[in-house]
Every structure is written in C-alpha cells, then in structure tokens.
Image (cartoon, rainbow, N blue to C red):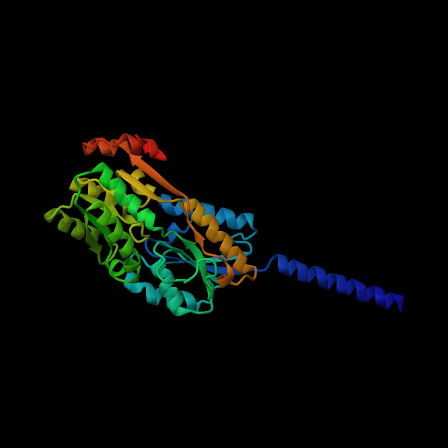
Amino acid sequence: MRRREFTIGLLLASAVRSVRAQERTKQHRIAIVLAGGTIARISERASDPTARRFYQAFFQELRRLGDVEGQNLTIERYSGEGRPASHADLAREVVSHLPEVIVASTGPVALAVRAATATIPIVFEDAARIGLVTNLAHPGGNMTGVSLFDTELIAKRLQILKEVVPSASRIAILNMRRQWEGAYGQAFQPAYQEASGRLHIELVPASLEESTPSEYQRVFAAIAKDPPDAILVTDIGDLIPYRQLIVELVEKSSLPAMYGLRDYVEAGGLMAYGADFGETGRRMADDVHEILNGANPGDIPVYQASKFEFVINLKTAQALGLAMPPTLLAGADEIIE
C-alpha cells in the first residue's frame, strides 16, 4: 500500500513539474501593424531612428517582463506601406491569423483593425483620439493603448512657428488626405481652428494621396506655385519613412518648418515639438504584457502622453537667415549645431 502511494506521489509530482514547465514556456503570438514603411522598421536595429527609439523601448520592456521574441513570444509584422486605402484589407488579413494581441501603430490603422474584429485585443498608439474609445480611464471593448492627442500640442507647434516668423499669416499643413478629411482630421479641426484663430493665421492643407516619393514631389510643386509663409509637417506614421525627402523638399522651398518628430530635425529640419516615443513604447509593451497574462484590454486605462520635447537645428535656422528668439533657445530640450 505504501509502495503504491509512493508511486502515485511520484507520478503526481512529475505531472505538476510538467504542467509548471509548460506554463513557464507558454507561447504567445502578437501582430504589429505599421501605417507606412517596410516591416524592417519593427526592430530595435531599424535604420529609422523614430522606429528604433520606439521598438528599443518596446522590446526591452517586454523582455524585462519575461516576454522574449524567439523564446516564448512570436511576432508577426505587417505594414500598410503608406497607402491608407489598403488598411481595411490589411486589417482583415491580420485578423485572419488570429494573434492574441494586435499592436496598431496609428489611429487610422487601429480603426481599420477594430472594424475587422471586436474580440481580438488591440493596443493602439493614437495621435488624434478619433473615437477609438470614449473613456480613457475605462476604455471598454477590446482596445487600450496610448493617446498622444493634446490640444495644447497643436497650439504649441503653431505658436512656436509664429514666434519664429511673426509675419506669418498662411501656414501649410502636410498630411494624408484621407486622414485630414476623415475622422482623423476632424478630431484635430477644433484645436487647429482655435489655435489658428488666436494667432491670426490661415491653415492651408497640403494633402498627400499616398505616402510615395512621386506624391511628395507633386505636393511640394503645388506649394511652390502659391507659397505659404511656413510649413507644419504632422507626426503621422505614414510620413516618417520619407522624412529625409520631406526635409530636402522643405529646404528647397526655403520655408521655415515645424515638424512633429525630432527625427526630421536630425535629418536637417528646422525644429520639432513632439512626444517622447521611448515612453510610448514602454507603455504599450506594458499593455501587451498585461493582456497576454489575462487582463481585459477594456479595463486597462489608456495612457495620456505627458512627455514632450522641443528640438532646434541652429545650422538650418542660420541657413534660412532666421534669428531664433532667445526665449525659444532657452526653452529647447536640445539644440543641434
């Protein structure tokens, strides 16, 4: 009897160890969907500094939490390649593979994915708060993520441009047409209208049909025919892969420009005021980890970005013949000389 009990005990202990080992090595699968660029951007070694900064923070945080690609985590990578019209088809393809979590890089991509599934958890990065959730503290449904939207962010960019070019009365806004004229753009309109009215400037959309080199050439050729006083380049993901081309075209126009991301300034642009993407990456990784461990995305509060940085390229300012106000130089987080 004792021998039988001893044998049963050994079998039970072996089974417990086996279950625990399986739990430790449980495999997870997530999908990451970009708006533009190639899937090579989804890497800690991406040549794109914005993507590299975000994904270094994202993957490092996942590893710290025990989610390691190639060990217990599989990552499927997708890109809309700068063509908003393809988002719906891409979202359906992603959903058909049934990942445990979908990470959507922009609000428009998140909207497309949400239209394709009401059950697979979605972690988004949204720059416009375009109706993805109705309550940041209690998002509900199958979504959570990071909101970069801040009406003061828009006002700050325009205000800085006006300080640099006090005589500016017309400012062109480089954006994607489908986003500017759709829900994405409409979410921004009140903030743009309020800020432009207060600063006595007219905002002129410079809209791209898609994010391709030929389309940038077309839009800037149109800008040259009726030049504004300055240009505001938005921070949407579709534009980032072509930041060098954008900076070169802006330089050719001889117009001062404000950018939404520091990477444009590092590429030679005049100045940028935007969110800290390292912090964004860490926050989104935390959300993914919680969901993989059983949390309901609708119960995870959406994080409101609060860290922003102002960067100035003094060499570009001098080339444009601009005397940067001392107050702006004093308030810059970084000055590139």
295 relative to 188 in the view: left or right: right
Q: Residue at x 33, y 63 (%)?
A: 87
Which one is nearer the viewer's eye here, 45 or 120? 120
User: Is residue 293 rendered to the left or right of residue 122?
Assistant: right
Please provide percent x and percent y for residue 176: 25, 56
Toward which corner of the image does residue 269 lie, by quadrant? top left
Q: Quadrant of the N terminus?
A: bottom right
Residue at 30% across / 44% down in the picture?
Answer: 156
Residue 61 seen in the figure: yes
Q: Residue furthest right?
A: 1
Which quarter of the rendered picture does the C terminus lie within? top left
Residue 82 image offset from top left, x and y in percent: 29, 56
Left/right of residue 20 with respect to residue 245 in the rendered view? right
Dividing the picture into quadrants, the one containing residue 329 is top left
266 in relation to 226, above or below: above
Q: Of all residues shown, which one is farthest toward the left?
A: 225
Q: Residue at x 30, y 53 (%)?
A: 238
Would residue 45 be visible to someone looking at this image? no
Q: Position of residue 158 (x, y in %)?
A: 26, 45
Q: Residue furthest front?
A: 198
Residue 118 locus on image (x, y percent): 44, 69
